[in-house]
Image (cartoon, rainbow, N blue to C red):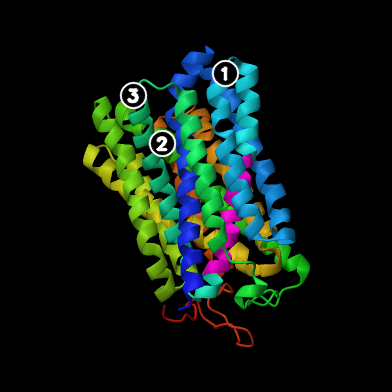
Amino acid sequence: MDRSLRAARVATYVYFVLCGTLMGAWVVHIPAIEERVGITHATLGGLLVLLGLGAFLGMRVAGRLTDRFGTRIVVPTGGVLCAAALVLPGLAHNAWTLGAALLVFGFCNGCLDVGMNAHAVHVEKAYGRPVMSGFHATFSVGGVLAALVAAATSSAGASPAAGMAALGAVGIVTALVSARALLPGAADTGNDTQTHGTGASPAGARRRIWLLAALALMVMLSEGAANDWSALHFKDVLGTSTSTAAIAYGTFAAAMTTGRLLADRLAGRFGPMAILRHGAAVAAVGITLVALGPWMWTAFTGWALFGLGLSGCVPQLFSAAGHADPAAAGANVSRVAGLGYLGMLAGPAVIGWLSHAVALNHAFLLLTLLCTTTAVAAGVLRTHSVGTRRGEPAPTGDRPHHTSA
């Protein structure tokens, strides 16, 4: 395989780790920044909406810029801006400045997110086999790195602003150094710019993209709900200790990371539609066990199955959006990622609202419905084929054509 393509894949891993590290650095410093600014949990919750709004706007802008100027410009620019903006929340001194900082940081993070996913689509197309899930797995690695760095800087007595500034500086250098290995663009990797495998009209193609976006919303809403409510489910519903409750989220996160490390190989063998359909079905079974199971070990099993099932779903949806039309990969990925991101932000709130009407564990049955709907609608990926070459017909079945590395 071409050495430049291998380098581009490594660079894509670097940007996914960078994005996860920068976002994780904000998350792990939330308690300290909240105390420094002097705001309540309720106020913080409202300010986090600005983070989401900024990310959504950044995704939409970056999608268009990516298609116009290419990922080789947008990805490192997004990385530099996101790393530079990381320090802003640490410098905030009241709710207004924190809100402005989160809006800017969210915008820059959204730009990096869409740019690196669009580049991942180009890399995957050049490889001729699924590699997207592996990129998403390394995003989680960034969160672990952020936690370790935060622990080290806090132990050294550094303020959140100092720690975030130092990490941001490293991020800027990383984004600039890694830029040289990025692919110039879809046309330069031997990909044509026609819609692959669909034979659909422009209106039909747009409907398909928005269907992918709707499925991303459902899957990421489910993921967001698990992030915020898995530990509380153990503590408030099952009556476990705080330490045991923390393991519940750890079980979900570990299962999701493991699943993403395996999903590319499985997608290469069985096809993306199978990953989405069976993954969503496994997730539906898992969250149903959580919702209805009265025992702690049943709940552990349920959260593990939920994370394992969801793990490969989002990468398949992002990949399908990017491959639908390589010439508009950025815009299509931004639509799917943007709506999915809104779902992730909405998930905790939706479950919280439902928990006022029914027991928390029974509120999780909404996630069962969403995952089941995703499994039923997985046929939208039937026409998606990562490995389709120029001049070759798309495979007729679910399994993609692929070449060896």
Mark 3 residue type: Ala
Q: Quadrant of the C terminus?
A: bottom left
The single residue placed furthest to the top in the displayed view is 38
Image position of 369 (left or right of 186):
left
User: Are the residues tagged 2 and 3 within 8 Å (C-beta)?
Assistant: no
Q: Which residue is mark 2?
A: 362
Q: Position of residue 93 (x, y in %)?
A: 58, 15
- Residue 404, compared with residue 243, is above or below; it is below
Magenta residue check for 114 = yes
Q: Which residue is mark 3?
A: 156
Q: Which mark is residue 155?
A: none
Q: Which residue is mark 1?
A: 43
Mark 1 residue type: Thr
Residue stretch in magenta = 108-123
- Residue 119, compared with residue 3, is above or below; it is above
Mark 2 residue type: His
Dominant SS of magenta comes to helix
Question: What's the residue at 70%, 74% (across, down)?
Answer: 193
Residue 319 seen in render: no
